[in-house]
């Protein structure tokens, strides 16, 4: 059983007991996004993610910058600055961007690197 399967199994067991556990890992942009339930046409419960709103980039504490190189990809930038390529979404949030490719399309662009929201000094 891999980590995702174990996390999903644990989330299912805790959910049955009434506890709320994110089915997403701690590095996921959706980890803190609330889950909701609706009923399908047959009355079966269907779980879904509520909308995730982007944080205000000005409320995030900037800890660095990255100047885009011609060969950069956002996952490689995230690997370099956060030691985790899956945290590329944090660079998108810090630069108020919905399209990750847009951030590395122009060499020379300076990308904000910030603390995540929820950390002391990291915004709300």
Image: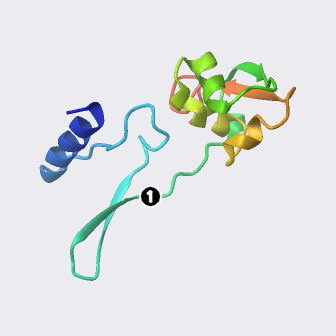
Residue pushed farthest bottom? Answer: 41
Q: Is the residue 47 above or below the residue 95 in the image?
A: below
Residue 19 on image: x %, y %: 20, 46
Tell me which residue sits at (21%, 73%) in the image.
44
Tell me which residue sits at (50%, 57%) in the image.
51
Tell me which residue sits at (76%, 28%) in the image.
111
Q: Is the residue 80 above or below the residue 90 in the image?
A: above
Q: Where on the picture, by quarter, is residue 100? A: top right
At label 1, counting other C-alpha atoms closer than 10 Å, the crowd grade (few under 14, some 14-19, many 20 or more) is: few
- 109 or 60: which is nearer to us? 109
Which of the image's four quarters has the N terminus?
top left
- Seen in the image, is 31 located left or right of residue 15? right
Residue pushed farthest front? Answer: 71
Which of the image's four quarters has the C terminus?
top right
Tell me which residue sits at (17%, 44%) in the image.
14
Q: Secondary structure at mark 1?
A: loop
């Amino acid at each position: 059983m891999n980590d995702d399967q174990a996390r999903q199994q644990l989330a299912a067991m805790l959910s049955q007991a009434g506890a709320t556990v994110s089915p997403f890992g701690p590095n996921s942009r959706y980890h803190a996004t609330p889950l909701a339930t609706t009923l399908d046409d047959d009355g079966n419960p269907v779980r879904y993610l509520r909308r995730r709103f982007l944080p205000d980039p000005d409320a995030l504490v900037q800890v660095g910058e990255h100047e885009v190189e011609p060969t950069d990809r956002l996952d490689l930038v995230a690997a370099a600055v956060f030691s985790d390529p899956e945290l590329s979404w944090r660079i998108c949030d810090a630069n108020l961007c919905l399209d990750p490719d847009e951030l590395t399309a122009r060499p020379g662009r300076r990308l904000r690197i910030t603390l995540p929201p929820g950390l002391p000094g990291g915004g709300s």
